[in-house]
């Protein structure tokens, strides 16, 4: 089999309409990340783990996304991006089925965390290939135009997982299923959905002429080429500012997002809002994510109209200001489901709008001969910026209580404003071309 024959069931049509593959690829990219980031938090909370343990264990699952730059050159050098997308989706679907089978076991924490780590490793590899495939298949103006689309369908994955799956688990529990059994059924449904996505992409993904293994530089060994590609990214004169932006733009949100579900689920006497699992699925996983999608779609559109530089400051302000809502919720502890849903939606809209700037900045600094590797490095640093703050968030919350924890969140928005002031962006970057 030749190097360009990797899992090539679809016609070799690099002009295939992006609407046929961009949405579904980013649904497949979003589901595993949301399982690690949010669904596992609710599941382990239902199964009786403490906030400290939940934050620590589930944050360790970010590690494959942090270290994925270490193997990203191999995704560039071996086989095609299309091959890696289909293969990793198959592995992820199988991993979800294994989680479903091990949840009823007595030592479920150890087994499920091990399987979820394998899933996360496969998902991180999938992200490398998918993001590279996106940049190979679209020119810069269309990348800007579709950045909102990919964000929206990434959020569709969030609704399907953080919303739909959590609601399903909650409904099963209300109908008498034991907690472990309810989550086992939920993960089996997830496995079936993900394996269906794998089959769809096997036939639908196009085969662009540019999607081919990168060639080794003349006279270089594989190992030498590996280190050369990795170090190219870090030779930029502004690399310190770039890394600081990736690490601290979302410093506050990284801590906030890990404790939202426990806050909504915890009893009122513990400072929470005392909602059921199904309520959390509807409010945080559906209404909140819909607002997140609208924010992301609007963010992509306004960058396409006026450029990233024009909107950077409005976006960082709009992303961080709504964190005040959780200060109010922790004080007032409102009982109205509708009011809580509205409050969460406002905060999530701001986050979705502000995160678009982060995504476009990552794309901007990833331009070059090795787009796939550079973007993988960027997202790896981004994952580190999520992993470290979220690991300590459960411990901080249990020490401070929910009210003081949300004041702490407001304080930790300051680094995001500082790094925004430091970055340099071409005024025309991301803006549609006239004519």
Image: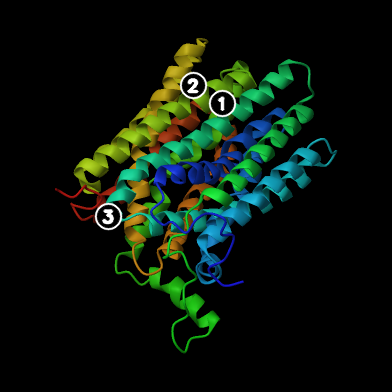
Residue at the extreme bottom of the image, as rendered = 219
What mark, if any, has residue 228 been given in the picture? none
Quarter of the figure with residue 135: bottom left
Q: Residues within 10 Å of mark 3 (few under 14, many from 20)?
A: some
Between residues 196 and 363, which one lies in front from this camera angle? Answer: 196
The furthest residue to the left: 435
Q: Residue at x 62, y 49 (%)?
A: 61
Question: For the N terminus, which image quadrant?
Answer: bottom right
Q: Is residue 206 toward the left or the right of residue 416 in the image?
A: right
- Circle 2: is it few (<14), some (14-19), or many (20+) Cα within 10 Å? many
Separation (CA) of disc 3 from disc 2: 34 Å
Left or right of 324? Residue 51 is right
Mark with earlier residue (3, 2)? 2
In this rendering, does residue 35 appear at all? yes
Which numbered disc, 3 or 2, marks the residue closer to the eye?
3
* Residue receiving disc 3: 423
* Towards the viewer: 81 or 304: 81
Image location of residue 2, percent across then percent down: 57, 72
Q: Could you tell me which residue is drawn at 47 percent across and 73 percent down?
A: 214
Give the spatial CA distance, label 2 vs label 1: 8 Å
Residue 258 x %, y %: 54, 37
Q: Residue furthest right?
A: 106
Q: Which residue is mark 2?
A: 330
Outermost top residue: 336
Q: Which mark is residue 263?
A: 1
Q: Is residue 375 above or below residue 215?
A: above
Pointer 1 local density, CA inside 10 Å: few below 14, some 14–19, many at least 20: many
Task: Report the number of numbered marks.
Answer: 3
């Amino acid at each position: 089999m030749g190097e360009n024959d990797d899992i090539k069931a679809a016609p070799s049509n690099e002009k295939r309409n992006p609407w046929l593959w961009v949405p579904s690829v980013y649904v497949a990219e979003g589901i595993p990340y949301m399982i690690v980031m949010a669904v596992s938090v609710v599941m382990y909370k239902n199964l009786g783990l403490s906030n400290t343990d939940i934050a620590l264990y589930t944050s360790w699952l970010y590690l494959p996304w942090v270290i994925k730059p270490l193997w990203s050159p191999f995704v560039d050098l071996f086989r095609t991006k299309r091959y890696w997308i289909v293969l990793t989706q198959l592995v992820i679907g199988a991993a979800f089925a294994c989680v479903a089978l091990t949840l009823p076991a007595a030592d479920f924490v150890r087994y499920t965390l091990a399987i979820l780590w394998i899933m996360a490793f496969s998902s991180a590899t999938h992200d490398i290939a998918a993001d590279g495939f996106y940049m190979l298949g679209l020119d810069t103006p269309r990348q800007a135009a579709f950045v909102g689309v990919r964000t929206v369908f990434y959020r569709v994955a969030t609704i399907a997982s953080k919303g739909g799956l959590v609601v399903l688990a909650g409904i099963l529990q209300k109908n008498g299923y034991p907690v472990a059994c309810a989550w086992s059924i939920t993960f089996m449904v997830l496995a079936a959905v993900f394996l269906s996505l794998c089959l769809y992409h096997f036939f639908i993904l196009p085969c662009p002429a540019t999607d081919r293994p990168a060639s080794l530089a003349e006279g270089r060994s594989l190992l030498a080429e590996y280190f050369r590609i990795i170090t190219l990214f870090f030779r930029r004169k502004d690399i310190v500012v770039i890394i600081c932006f990736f690490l601290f733009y979302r410093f506050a949100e990284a801590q906030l997002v890990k404790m939202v579900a426990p806050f909504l689920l915890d009893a009122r006497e513990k400072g929470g809002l005392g909602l059921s699992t199904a309520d959390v699925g509807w409010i945080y996983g559906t209404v909140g994510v819909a607002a997140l999608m609208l924010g992301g779609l609007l963010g992509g559109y306004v960058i396409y109209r006026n450029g990233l530089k024009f909107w950077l400051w409005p976006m960082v302000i709009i992303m961080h200001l709504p964190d005040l809502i959780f200060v109010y919720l922790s004080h007032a502890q409102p009982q109205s489901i509708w009011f809580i849903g509205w409050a969460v939606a406002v905060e999530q809209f701001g986050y979705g709008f502000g995160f678009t700037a982060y995504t476009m900045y990552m794309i901007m600094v990833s331009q070059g001969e090795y787009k796939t590797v550079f973007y993988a490095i960027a997202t790896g640093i981004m994952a580190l910026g999520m992993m470290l703050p979220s690991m300590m968030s459960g411990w901080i919350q249990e020490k401070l209580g929910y009210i003081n924890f949300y004041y702490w969140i407001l304080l930790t928005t300051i680094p995001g404003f500082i790094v925004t002031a430091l970055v340099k962006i071409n005024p025309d970057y991301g803006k549609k071309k006239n004519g």
